[in-house]
Amino acid sequence: MRYGLISDIHGNLEAFQASLEALSKLNIDKYLCIGDIVGYGADPKACIALVKSLEPVALVSGNHEWGVLGLLDLEYFNEYAKEAILWTKVALDKGDSDYLLSFRLIYKDDGMTLVHGTLDHPEDFNYTLDINDAYISMKLMKTSLCFVGHSHVPGIFYSEGDGIKANAAPEVKIEEDRKYVVNIGSIGQPRDGDPRASYAVFDDEKKTVEIRRVAYDIKKAQEKILKAGLPGRLASRLSLGE
Ligand code: ZN
């Protein structure tokens, strides 16, 4: 089985379409979504519809879903995010909200765990940026693989004895006796200096996880953000990957 993992789309339809086009060439059997479909970008409704059409086997909530649904105090967000959440709330209808409300905080099956933030307090939406952050989830994992999002910085972390290491490459071969925390990065607003959309593929037969990147029409996404009256910073940061 080949799984396509998507996260932090953030209403960026151009980035999402480019990612799905790239994924469609990889014989993906099932999709999994790690949250933050909405927020920041100008196409939250279209992105929700596109996620729905994939019929993902797993849907976990991000902080932006919680913000839009009123489950998270808006004081939690910075001024740009807050403005985007208020804008997104108006753009969505009841059907969209009901769909977002059906997401859970943690998804777990035999092979993998999914959480937007970290496993210790998923409702706090903490970042996984380095080995120390990844270790927090690794200690609590009941599966050998855990996929996370939220920081918009892709990275693969694996257990080594009692410790943890960062994988230098964007792909890894899964070994039986190790645990892996994989931050799949962001489709709609990457923040690792590489503006290309980031997503991941997990092949449970070949036992491989790969973080992949794809270029998209950034200019078009930026123009839509500005036209929608969203903060200019949300447009400019896309071409910088920050
Ligand atoms: Zn996000």
Image (spheres, grey):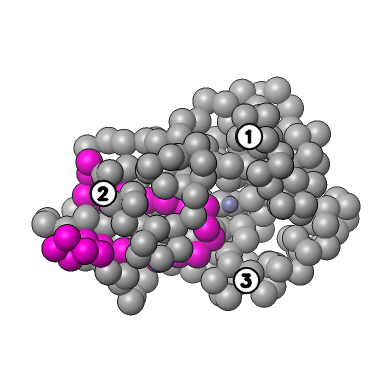
Q: What amino acid does circle 3 point to?
A: Gly
Left or right of residue 15: residue 200: left
Label 1 crowd bin: few (<14), some (14–19), many (20+), radius 10 Å: some
Quickly name the residue at label 1: 72
Query: Sequence order check: which comes first, mark 2 or mark 1?
Result: 1
Residue 241, numbered label: 3
Quickly name the residue at label 2: 139
Q: Secondary structure at mark 3?
A: loop
Q: Quadrant of residue 58?
A: top left
Q: Can the viewer see residue 43 in this picture?
A: no
* Residue at 80% from the left image edge and 34% from the top image edge: 90
Q: Can the viewer see residue 235 in this picture?
A: yes
Pick whichever, 20 or 63, lies toward us.
63
Pick whichever, 96 or 177, lies toward us.
177
Query: Sequence order check: which comes first, mark 3 or mark 2?
Result: 2
Q: Are marks 3 and 2 in contact (CB under 8 Å)?
A: no
Q: Secondary structure at mark 1?
A: loop
The image shows residue 176 at horizontal and vertical percentages of 12, 56
* Range covered by the magenta-colored residues: 142-164
